[in-house]
Amino acid sequence: MIPRTLEKSLNQRLSEVPAVVLTGPRQVGKTTLALSVGESRGALYLDLESERDRSKLAEPELYLSNRFETLTILDEVHRVPGLFPIIRGLIDRARRNGYRRGLYLLLGSAALDLLKQSGETLAGRVSFLELHPFSILETASEIRDLDRLWLRGGFPDAFLSDSDAESMRWREDFIRTYLERDIPQFGPRIAAETLRRFWTMLAHLEGTNLNTAQLARNIGIDTKTAGSYVDLLVDLLLVRRLPSWHANVGKRIVKSPKIFIRDTGILHALLGVDDIDNLLSHPIVGRSWEGFIIENLLTAAADGAQAYFYRTSGGAEVDLLLVWPGGEKWVIEVKRSLAPKLERGFHSACKDLGPERMFVVYPGDDSYPLTKEVSVVPPFEIMRIVRDYRPRFGTGEDSRR
């Protein structure tokens, strides 16, 4: 098992609150992580996609009421939404008997639906974590590993495949399974071929501003339906909408979000990019690299960090604006060049935003100053900087590190 950076946070949360909800797309490793954490706790594991395990919960209150001394792991818990009120009652009963922490670990694949159900029912009793695919910090110790992670993506079975061809087959099967089996569980019945075309169209638009009306026209559906398709893929943690920074800076801001396929392995499978040579010669290469770095940065960032992009009609633009708790701003530009240069738009954006720190991420090995204010850093270094940073409340000189 490749150690997951989230394991420490998960153990900490279980030592603090009665229930933890762990979300993440299917096949990302939630069950493996949960079983690893649960092994030392003598945990009970129930897979609610298994008819046998669901039958054990025919009388859930009776079955679970005497198990407060050990952790109970409920996998794919969204399959039995009626459990949440019962778990709330069991948590309250456990508290009265002196059991206040580490009672339930709930796993699920649909973020919005699961968060809504658990948040409304278990308010004040639950904490939330999201498990991402493998990140640079977990798997990429050298450039060769970095390219493999970028090409194949971070789903464990795709990344760890014996060959690029085997990885591609796994990802194609993953997409087919989502389209034919998983997505119909969470949304209205959508023809798999229609959603496949829609998902592929989003892949071609990687890193561009989302225009739902244009998407709808291209695929022959109405704008509301196209919006619901995007919402569904976002909810399933397969697509990211990166919002625009909307603060009043006295400029005409581009407000529509940028769209990214969150895992570049899935992106490349949708586009038929099967090896690193094809990727490096493909028109998507720059936007794929940008999405790869942004997704990894957001995985590494501490809780509470907010992510945006910034663009004005006058040409000021940065790829990523990280706003830390307390308001401190970092600007990060992503370049697929060993000799990165900054355009005037970057400097104009920094003048508008007034960030505390400015970075350019490039696919090299060394860090160096590009200007007095701007540092050029390789992917490994920026991930460590973001992971290890602890924001101070307030902005300006007192919050800089």
Image: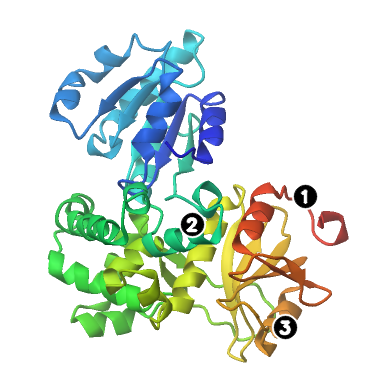
Front label number (1 vs 3): 3
Q: Residue at x 72, y 74 (%)?
A: 353
Q: Residue 347's mark?
A: 3
Look at the numbered discs 1 and 2 and tell me whether their residues touch, using CB distance below 8 Å. Answer: no
* Mark 3: amino acid: His
Q: Residue at x 18, y 26 (%)?
A: 54
Residue bearing the label numbered 2: 145
Looking at the image, residue 351 lies above or below residue 34: below
Front label number (1 vs 2): 2
Q: CA distance from mark 2 to mark 3?
A: 33 Å
* 92 to the left or right of 321: left
Q: CA distance from mark 1 to mark 3?
A: 25 Å
Furthest residue toward bottom: 314
Residue bearing the label numbered 1: 392
* 232 to the left or right of 150: left
Task: Label 1, secondary structure: give it.
Answer: loop
